Image (cartoon, rainbow, N blue to C red):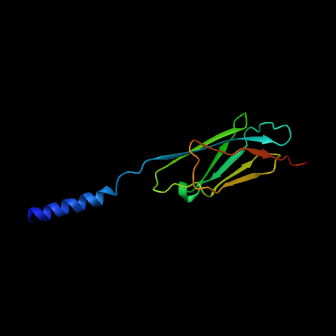
Amino acid sequence: MTAIHRFAIGVAALIALSGCRELEPTTVHLQGRVRSLGLQTPIPAAQVTVQWPRGLAGGVSTHRTNSEGQYVVERTVRQREVSCAGLAISVEAAGYATAYARYTEADCGGDALTFDFTLYPIPR
């Protein structure tokens, strides 16, 4: 093998490996409050379910609100294309109707996406 062949193989290997670098992590932050209709009282322990879109690696995660009705959710992904389009959140609490929200923008909002929910009491 000549020096020219070795050089050509080396250049080809460098070009091939340049596309294999590790992807930088992207973290998406979701936050919000869950309150009842009327007096806007916080609803503690409400179940917040996030359906992650393909642009955030897909899947479902479930969380609970704190005593102030607040929730914070984070997801870190390493993907070439990150998109929040199709993100869906549902909130359930005993004695209240379930609430839903869907995010349609591709942009994940920089610092955090905020989704506040007002739940309607179910008459007994």
- Specify the farthest residue to the top: 67
Name the one closer to the observer, 117 or 121: 117
Viewer-closest of 85 and 68: 85
Residue 55 vs 29, above or below: the answer is: below
Residue 8, given in percent of the width and then of the height, sits at 18, 63
Residue at (73, 43) in percent of width and height? 46
Q: Residue furthest right?
A: 124
Q: Is residue 88 above or below residue 64?
A: below
Which residue shows up at 19% across the image and 59% down it?
10
Q: Position of residue 99 (x, y in %)?
A: 76, 51
Left or right: residue 37 versus residue 82 is right
Q: Is residue 53 left or right of residue 39?
A: left
What residue appears at the point 57 percent right and 52 percent down from the top-left corner? Answer: 107
119 vs 63, nearest the viewer: 119
Q: Position of residue 60 (x, y in %)?
A: 61, 53
Splitting the image into 4 quarters, where does residue 106 fall?
bottom right
Please tell me how many numbered marks the rendered image carries. Answer: 0
Q: Which quarter of the rendered picture does the N terminus lie within?
A: bottom left
The answer to whether residue 120 is above or below residue 40 is below
In the picture, residue 36 is in which quadrant?
top right
**Which residue: 80% across, 46% down?**
119
Image location of residue 111, percent across then percent down: 57, 41
Task: In the displayed orientation, state which residue is furthest to the left.
Answer: 2
In the displayed structure, does residue 93 sit left or right of residue 31? right
